Every structure is written in C-alpha cells, then in structure tokens.
Image (cartoon, rainbow, N blue to C red):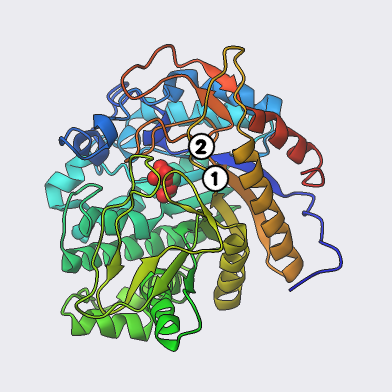
Amino acid sequence: MHHQKLDSFPSDFLWGSASAAYQVEGAWDEDGKGESVWDKFVKIPGKTFKGTTGEVAVDHYHRYKEDVQLMAEQGLKAYRFSISWPRIIPDGNGEVNEAGIKFYEDLIDELLANEIEPVVTLYHWDLPQALQDEYLGWEGRQIINDFTRYCEIVFKRFKDKVKYWVTLNEQNVFISHGYLAASHPPNVKDPKRMLQANHHANLANAKAIKLFHELDIEGQIGPSFAYGPTYAFDADPKNQLAAENREEINANFWMDIYVYGRYPKVAWKYFEDNGIAPTIEVGDFDLLKEGKPDFLGLNYYQTATVKENRLDGVGAGKPNYTGEKGSTEESGMPGLYKEVSNPYVEYTNWDWAIDPSGLRIAMRRMTSRYDLPILITENGLGEYDRLEADGRIHDEYRINYIRDHIVAIQEAITDGVEVIGYCTWSYTDLLSWLNGYQKRYGFVYVDRDESNEKELKRYKKDSYFWYKKVIETNGQEL
Ligand code: BGP
C-alpha cells in the first residue's frame, strides 16, 4: 500500500527503550537475591559465548541512577525493564525479600521523577532455580499458581506507579531454546516436554492477566512475542505451503492461545500425530479464554524466508553466535520448511536479516488476526561498535536500522494499525544471552568485554543523540 502522506505519530506515543534484569543488573547474589536458572546455566562449559555470564553484566544494579540520568537527558519517554523473580521471592514461592522490592521501587521512582514511563516485564527468563529443583519449573503445573502469586505481590506493590505490564517475554524463545535446542535452561531436548512446559506457560500467562483485570488495576497488560514473519522463497506452491507451515507452528500456535484461548487446528493436529501434544486438564481452556491481553507486545528483529523441506530433509542447524558472517548452518523442520537466505535483504554480522518492511508486515498480520493494540517491546541492531579515542562511537548503521524501522511503524500506523509505543533493544549495551558482550545494541556504549570488566564506563553513541532528536520532534525528524 502506498500512501500520499503518512500519519503523524500519536502525541502520547511512547518513545522507549528496553533491557532485561539478567542482561544488565549484575549483583547476581546480592541483597538476598535467590539463584536463577540462568545463574546456574551459564556455568555449564560451552553454553555461552566465551563462558560469559551476567554476574556483573553492566552493573545496572549499582548504577541505575546514572543510567536513568542518561535516559532523562535524552528525553526517553518509556523504559522497559524486567523484574527478577528471585530478587522478589528468592526461592520462588516462599518469603518475600524486601530488599529486592526496594531496588525496583527505587528504580521506578527514579524513572517517574524524570517523567519516564516504566514498562515492567514480569518474566524475562530468570526463573528461580529453587522452582526448577522443586518441580521442574515450567514442567510442573504448580508454576501456574506460583507465578500468579509472584505477579500479585508485584502488582499490589507497584500498581499506582506502573501502567504498562508485560507478562512473559518471548515465550516462544525461552520454551523452544530451553526444551528443544537445549541452548537455554533447563538444557533439555525433548519436544513433548517442551509442549507441556509451554502449555503451563500459557496457563500462567492467562492466570496472571485474569488476576490483573480482577484487581481492577488502572493499566494495560500483555505478553511480548518474538514474531518474525515468514516469506515463501518464491511463488512455487510448495514453498508457499512451507511458509504457511512456519507461520502456523511458529506464530499462530503461540499467539492464538493468548488472544482466543485455543490452539490452531493444523498445529494441534501436527503435534497430536507426532505424539507430542500436551496433556490438557478440565478447565484449562476456560482459563485461557479468561486471560485475554489488553495489547500484544511485539519483539521484532527479522523475517524468515523458507522453502519446502521433505520428511528426510534438513533439521535444526547451529545458529551464528560468534559474529562470523555467514557461519549460520542450514536449518529447518523436516516435513515442514527449511530456512534459506533472502536475496532481497542485507544481513548483519550475526546473519540476521535487516528487513524494516517485515516489521510493517508483522504489525499488519497481527492486527488482521488479533485486532489488539501493539506495543513494540523490542527492535534493534546487534553489531560490533568501536569506541574511538575521543570517546565517540559512530554507529550510523544502527541509526539507519532504527530509522528505517520507525518509518515502517509510521507506515503501519497509516495503514490502520494501533501502536502504543516503540521500545528499542537496548538502552545500554548489555549481555547477549548467547553472544557475549561483543554483540552490542545500546544507545549507550558500556566499556567492558568478555574477558575484562574494566570500569564499565558509559559513553553516548551517535545513535543516542539521533534518537534524542527523534523523540523531541515526535518522529518528525528522522
Ligand atoms: C530477544 C530477547 C532479548 C535480547 C534480544 C537480542 O530474543 O528478548 O533479551 O537478547 O533478543 O538477541 P541476542 O542477544 O541473541 O542478539
């Protein structure tokens, strides 16, 4: 669709940026915090890039005031961060740790004092290890009540200060990496266990949303989903069908349950035929229907392009976690699809497609299927950055990336999509779960690397100043 003129961004548009507790905070065992599954997983040799951990990360726990000051000076309107469950309840379902609550209360107060809207993610992957030990975490049904209790504690403490809440971050990523690829905790490769854990995550998500609505909190809540739309490689019907397969298994299967409380038929039949469909209990679908989100959070990085893949075709290949361009192995799901490279787009050094139109397509497809407002909870470019001798970082590649994606959002708005805001990933540089510290996303450079924490000094990148202008002009000056 071509437009004569693009609509302006709404005047209350949330120009934001994001982070996650484990990736920025550090202080992994301070002030009564319990161990999380990530604290433990990163110690398994070979699991993370050069053995990196978030034990210190970028020390946001001790430097949050300095970080919020940088946001304030930039004019940031919203900051999305996550609360670490084991800081609030160290063993997951026992005593509350007041010191943990206090850290987030101080952070929220600091944001509000600087007129920055806090957007709180309740779960960004750092499950209390104690729950993993007690009942296998997401595989145990008890997680539904324990997660809801944790949310209730947090809702009640912060309900007067926080208006935007994200339940689970990228359920599709933490479940598939955790239970199929064994590249996240709990380090399992078992599709049946994966789908059972996933069903519980769906129920926990719904129950927390239902509770939020029952508590009559003034605000909005929804999950954040990692949606990368699928393209068929060409008009060959076989490849078109492969694209349908990927959309059904990787997108509809996850988002339909959030919004409609049901699993789509084709995905469900596929899992049943393969003997891996989850066990459902009486009342599950009622609860799933009662937990309808107010908005959908969208984490968008890239699209995928696919071709037909026969039953004896290619399976999961190793992704590129090293930043060596072109090192991604061929990958697919036998019988469904295989990923191929798209000749129409450029790729990053980590082989991620750079495709702003894909963001517009994602928003359009979500609006068409779900008709809910969208909050873009993540979007950004992970690249190598160079700190110059004069303390500058010339990241024009990041500026170009974000600019093109902002234009895509404006086009989507003009198409008729309702958008609450845009949070870039990430505010400061931070730990990438599997790619160490060299894959940088921030507006603010943090001087540390894999082997040396140095002084963790902050530097403003060129993109910091550029985004400041974007915010000031409400997206008119890009
Ligand atoms: C998303 C996660 C983020 C962040 C981002 C970038 O999947 O929600 O936490 O890590 O991806 O990914 P990566 O660090 O792998 O480059």
Q: Quadrant of ligand 1?
A: top left
User: Is disc 1's CB within 8 Å of ligand 1?
Assistant: yes
Circle 2 packing at 10 Å, graded few (<14), some (14-19), many (20+), is: many
Query: Label 1: which residue?
Result: 380
Q: Inspect the image, locate mark 1, and give the three-letter code of the amino acid beneath it.
A: Gly
Quarter of the image with the C terminus is top right
Does residue 377 sit above or below 95 in this rendering?
Answer: below
In this picture, residue 445 sits left or right of residue 269: right
- Residue 441's disc is 2
Circle 1 packing at 10 Å, graded few (<14), some (14-19), many (20+), is: many
In terms of secondary structure, where does tag 1 sit? loop
Residue 195, horizontal then vertical, whole percent: 24, 68
Q: Inspect the image, locate mark 2, and give the three-letter code of the amino acid beneath it.
A: Tyr
In this picture, residue 39 sits left or right of residue 371: left
- The answer to whether mark 2 and mark 1 are in CB contact below 8 A is yes
Which residue ends up furthest to the right in the rendered image?
A: 4
Q: Residue at x 13, y 47 (%)?
A: 134
Is residue 162 something one can see in this rendering? no
Quarter of the image with the N terminus is bottom right
Residue 457, horizontal then vertical, whole percent: 50, 15
User: Is disc 2's CB within 8 Å of ligand 1?
Assistant: yes
